[in-house]
């Protein structure tokens, strides 16, 4: 697979089959409450497990996220972003401050996972600046700073749809868990979800994409 640049300047995988047009993704989308509860329940009920498919999906996600991280931080790019991994729990007051920092100062601060197991990922390297932190940095840059999307539930939903276009089908399986499964738990329960190594039902993810697009019309 290779990354290509579309006419609107978006970089996507050549064999992207998600069907999301730039206008659809960047133009809007919102979470369907019924689907959010269904996704949250599926995440909470699923045991964190190690199996060949889950391992492969997370390994692919880490590989592709690292490639994206290198691209957005490359000094050869005029819009390169300097990423700083910090112990500060809240480096930004809100999404607008994060967006402004990246746009004006070309700097992003990313909070490293807490020492406790509740914030460390069971499959992705959670060392400071490791694969888990790099995934989160890419999400903040691509999903929020470059797209201008907030941290509200609809902003996170569209940020997920935006970011998944940069990944292969296998990596998207893990990305859906990380960006939509965990956020759905937060939206519906008010609590952050413990990181898990799980792959949600592809049909459930397909339906939540479709319902989200329908709800925004």
Image (spheres, grey):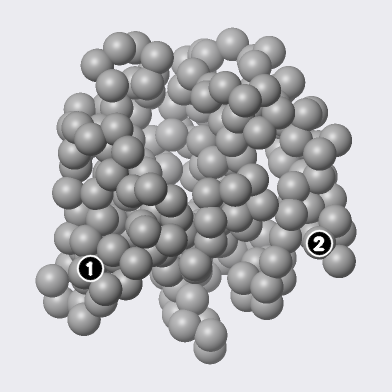
93 left or right, relative to 69 = right
Secondary structure type for disc 1: loop
Image quadrant holding the N terminus, namely bottom left
| Front residue of this view, candidates 89 and 28 | 89
- Reading the image, the residue beneath label 1 is 106
Residue 120 higher or lower than 77, as above or below: above
Residue pictured at 57% horizontal, 65% vertical: 15
Residue 160 higher or lower than 202, as above or below: below
Nearest to N terminus: mark 1 or mark 2: 1
**Structural distance between the alpha carbons of marks 1 and 2:** 32 Å
- At label 1, counting other C-alpha atoms closer than 10 Å, the crowd grade (few under 14, some 14-19, many 20 or more) is some
- Reading the image, the residue beneath label 2 is 216
Residue pictured at 34% horizontal, 21% vertical: 120
Q: Quadrant of residue 116?
A: top left
Secondary structure type for disc 2: loop
Residue 178 higher or lower than 100, as above or below: above
88 left or right, relative to 202 = left
Instruction: Look at the numbered discs 1 and 2 and tell me whether their residues touch, using CB distance below 8 Å.
Output: no
Q: Is residue 48 visible?
A: yes
């Amino acid at each position: 697979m290779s990354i290509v640049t579309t006419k609107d300047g978006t970089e996507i995988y050549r064999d992207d089959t998600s069907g999301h047009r730039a206008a659809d993704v960047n133009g809007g989308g919102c979470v369907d409450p019924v689907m959010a509860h269904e996704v949250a329940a599926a995440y909470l009920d699923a045991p964190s497990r190690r199996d060949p498919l889950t391992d492969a999906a997370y390994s692919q996600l880490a590989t592709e996220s690292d490639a994206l991280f290198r691209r957005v931080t490359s000094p050869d790019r005029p819009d390169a972003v300097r990423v700083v991994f910090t112990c500060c729990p809240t480096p930004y007051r809100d999404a607008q401050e994060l967006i402004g920092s990246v746009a004006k100062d070309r700097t992003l601060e990313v909070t490293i996972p807490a020492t406790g197991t509740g914030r460390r990922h069971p499959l992705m390297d959670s060392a400071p600046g490791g694969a888990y932190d790099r995934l989160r940095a890419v999400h903040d840059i691509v999903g929020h700073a470059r797209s201008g999307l907030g941290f509200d539930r609809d902003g996170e939903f569209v940020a997920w749809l935006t970011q998944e276009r940069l990944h292969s089908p296998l990596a998207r399986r893990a990305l859906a868990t990380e960006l939509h499964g965990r956020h759905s738990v937060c939206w519906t329960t008010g609590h952050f979800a413990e990181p898990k190594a799980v792959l949600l039902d592809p049909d459930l993810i397909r339906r939540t994409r479709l319902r989200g697009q329908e709800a925004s019309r």
